[in-house]
Every structure is written in C-alpha cells, then in structure tokens.
Image (cartoon, grey):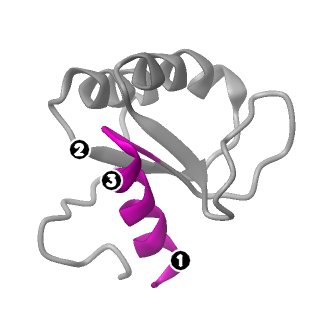
Amino acid sequence: SRLDVPGVAARPCGSAGLEYLKVARGEMDGLALTWPSAWDHAAGLLLVAEAGGAQSTVAGVPFRCDRDNELPFAGGRDEATAVRIRELLRGA
C-alpha cells in the first residue's frame, strides 16, 4: 500500500470529528480521508486550522465544504505534514 512506509500507522477512521481533534491537540500528526461529506469535515477542518494545521486535496487545493473535491484529502499538524501525506497518497 502507498501508506505502508516507516512512521505511518494507517487504520480505519471511527469518527472523523475525534480524529480531527487528535490532530488539533497534537496527539496525531495527520490524517487522510476519502469521503466528501461536508458535515463530517467542516468543524474538524476548522479545529485543525485554528491549531495551526493545514489540509488539502490530492490536487493540492484546500478541501472546500461548498463544492466537489478531488479525493482523498490530507490534514496535518502543519503544512509540511499535510504535504507529505498528500505525496504518499499520490504515490510520490
């Protein structure tokens, strides 16, 4: 798998809200998500952004709750982490 690399612990997402909270609190470096439902992401994306984190789709543009997005997308504790996750998702 593209995420089968040292330092990455890929696992299923039980609750998007709790996963975003872990990133915002610094308990988790980042996450990759594959579904577009705005109601699952809006509050979490705001939490991560307010904590200094970053997010973007595999196309390198921010995930937007008001339009279609290229999936998957990555969120990270900072821009470098979000970019690294995005690169892994693209197979770079």
Q: Type of residue at label 1?
A: Arg
Q: Where is residue 24 in the image (x, y as percent from the top left)?
A: 30, 23
Q: Which of marks 2 and 3 is in front?
A: 3
Q: Name the residue under label 3.
A: 81
Tags 2 and 3 in contact by the CB under 8 Å rule? yes
Tags 2 and 1 in contact by the CB under 8 Å rule? no
Q: In this view, does 75 lie above or below 1?
A: above
Task: Give the dominant element type of the magenta stretch: helix, strand or loop.
Answer: helix
Q: Position of residue 35 (x, y in %)?
A: 63, 46
Q: Type of residue at label 2?
A: Asp
Quadrant of residue 68 within the rendered picture: top right
Disc 2, SS: loop
**Label 1 Cα crowd, 10 Å radius (few <14 / some 14-19 / many 20+):** few
**Spatial CA span between label 1 and label 3:** 14 Å
Image quadrant where one finds the N terminus: bottom left
Most foreground residue, 35 or 65: 65
Per the rendering, the mark at residue 4 is: none
Q: Type of residue at label 3?
A: Thr
Q: Name the residue under label 2.
A: 29
Most foreground residue, 53 or 75: 53
Residue extent of the magenta highlight: 75-92
